[in-house]
Amino acid sequence: MDELKNKIRSTSSSSVHPELIDSSTEVQTTPKPKKNKFEELHQRDTVWIENELKKRLDNESAANGRGEKNRIINEA
């Protein structure tokens, strides 16, 4: 890498921006933290539920939109 920088400096220093050959301004980048997948934060489970309770749960979740059934179960 130093050899390449020296070559660039020796050929035409006026046509090259100093930022391109100056290694003292190198920026250290830190990797972004890994975002957890949905499956890593939640677990699927199958349960038996009484018929009347299932009807009430379905009606409530249909009235309030997507994710409502999960919210009700998680709060319970």
Image (spheres, helix red, strand yellow):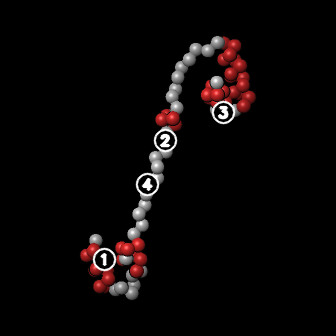
Q: Earlier in the sequence, mark 1 or mark 2?
A: 1
Q: Earlier in the sequence, mark 1 or mark 4?
A: 1
The residue tagged 4 is 31
Kind of residue sitting beneath label 1: Lys
Say which of 16 and 35 sits in front. 35
Can residue 69 be seen here? The reply is: no
- Where disc 4 sits, the SS reads loop
Kind of residue sitting beneath label 2: Asn
The residue tagged 2 is 36
Q: Earlier in the sequence, mark 2 or mark 3?
A: 2
Marks 2 and 3 close (CB-CB < 8 Å): no
Residue name at image x 32 percent, y 83 percent:
9
Asked whether, in this view, residue 70 is left or right of residue 13, the answer is right
- Where disc 3 sits, the SS reads loop
Nearer the camera: disc 1 or disc 2: 2
Residue name at image x 49 percent, y 45 percent:
35
Label 3 and label 1: CA atoms lie apart by 58 Å
Nearer the camera: disc 1 or disc 4: 4
The residue tagged 3 is 66
Residue name at image x 49 percent, y 39 percent:
37
For the C terminus, the quadrant is: top right
- Across and down, in percent, residue 51 comes to 66, 12
Kind of residue sitting beneath label 4: Pro
Residue 76: image tag: none
Label 4 and label 3: CA atoms lie apart by 34 Å
Q: Earlier in the sequence, mark 2 or mark 4?
A: 4
Label 2 and label 3: CA atoms lie apart by 22 Å
- Across and down, in percent, residue 34 comes to 46, 46
The residue tagged 1 is 5
- Across and down, in percent, residue 71 comes to 64, 30
* Residue at the extreme right: 63
